[in-house]
Amino acid sequence: MHWIVGDSASRRYADYRTAAQQCGMPTPVCVDWLDIIVDGVQVLDRMPLGSRLRIDSFGQRCEVLAALIRHGGGTEIPEVGEIRSLDRQHNGIRRVLMDLSRWSMCRSDVTFDQNPLEILLMFDKWATHARMLPHRPDAILLPTDEEGFNDRLHWFSKVAGGRVFVKPRYASSASGVCCYRVINGRHQLIAPIEIVRETQRPKLFNSLRVQSFTKSQDVRDIFRVLGPQGMIAEAAVNKARVEGDRFDLRYVVIDGRADHLVVRQSASPITNLHLGNRRGNLSAVIDAVGPARLESCRQLAIHAARCFPETLYCGVDILLPQRGEPLVCEVNAFGDFLPNLIADGMTVYQAILKAGYRRREVFV
């Protein structure tokens, strides 16, 4: 049997279930993250002997996020789309994944697609950064107090040439990601964020529109909200361009193979596809940078995935500077959701399903 810890109402689960049917495999059973958080990992005790377990995204359902925050000791529950309590949410995720890791030691008959502790590491950008050295952009961990945060960020922005990415340590999907720069003493912050000032305390919300903030008050308010939740600063890379746009590369590395690739192309510094950016043309990228440089990106993605040896698959984002060697931007435990992306006649989910059963047969 094939089981999933995930969101039973999500498209991710629906697409994965369809892929299993297309591969002639049993329909996966989904156990909701909320059930795991509320009732504990013992809800998995009913898994039959010899089962396979996939740990998928917990999604964006309000009740699940609230449960994770409370599980992590938090009391400030965000409104829909609000960027809040990321550190407490991470504490909740950590507790669940630690419990799953301990549970796995008692159920050696269950094959995990991913080691829960490796997923936990990928959820921490700073810890992942340390593992990826020297193949990551220069980065620092920022203090959580306002004065220390500002002093350290301003120092690093000068060292990094005036432009840096400031990222929540524990967030994903570009939530709270800011491109920050100082030009002739003037500050600019580019981010998919909306500021709402209905009370004395401003609130930040995720937005599908990438905006440019140039007012000092806006920049201060954004960092005052995000800073205490934990952030890193990362030197901005002058990315290679195709058709006049910046681009980076998302590889899904599956059991040591990096066949599934999407070009994320954008006019803005933030390239995530859900922000209205587009999948670029791979042939155009090859024409722009050459096959040898593209192959070096693929090899780096494979190397990054090998840093997590007990993970069957992960998404690896690669930055290609206009000059120099490629760099690892992110390693994403749930970075496999790329619908309709075909390589060797298989979607990402079909390739994961088949690779998992091949690996399972080797160890049985």
Image (spheres, rainbow, N blue to C red):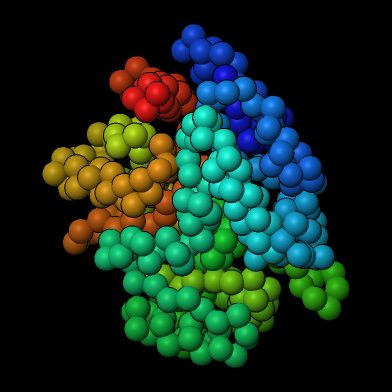
Return the residue nearer the eye: 268 or 71: 71
| In the image, residue 54 above or below residue 173 | above
Q: Quadrant of the image for the C terminus?
A: top left
Return the residue nearer the eye: 23 or 113: 113
Residue 183: where, in percent of width, then height?
43, 81
| Residue at horizontal 51 percent and vertical 61 percent from the top | 124
* Residue 328 falls left or right of residue 1: left
Q: Residue furthest top?
A: 24
Return the residue nearer the eye: 269 or 359: 359
Residue 309: where, in percent of width, then height?
36, 45
Residue 83's quadrant in the figure?
bottom right
Residue 155: where, in percent of width, then height?
43, 88
| Residue at horizontal 78 percent and vertical 58 percent from the top | 70
Q: Quadrant of the image for the N terminus?
A: top right
Using the rendered image of the protein, determine whether residue 11 is visible from the camera's viewpoint: no
Residue 78's quadrant in the figure?
bottom right
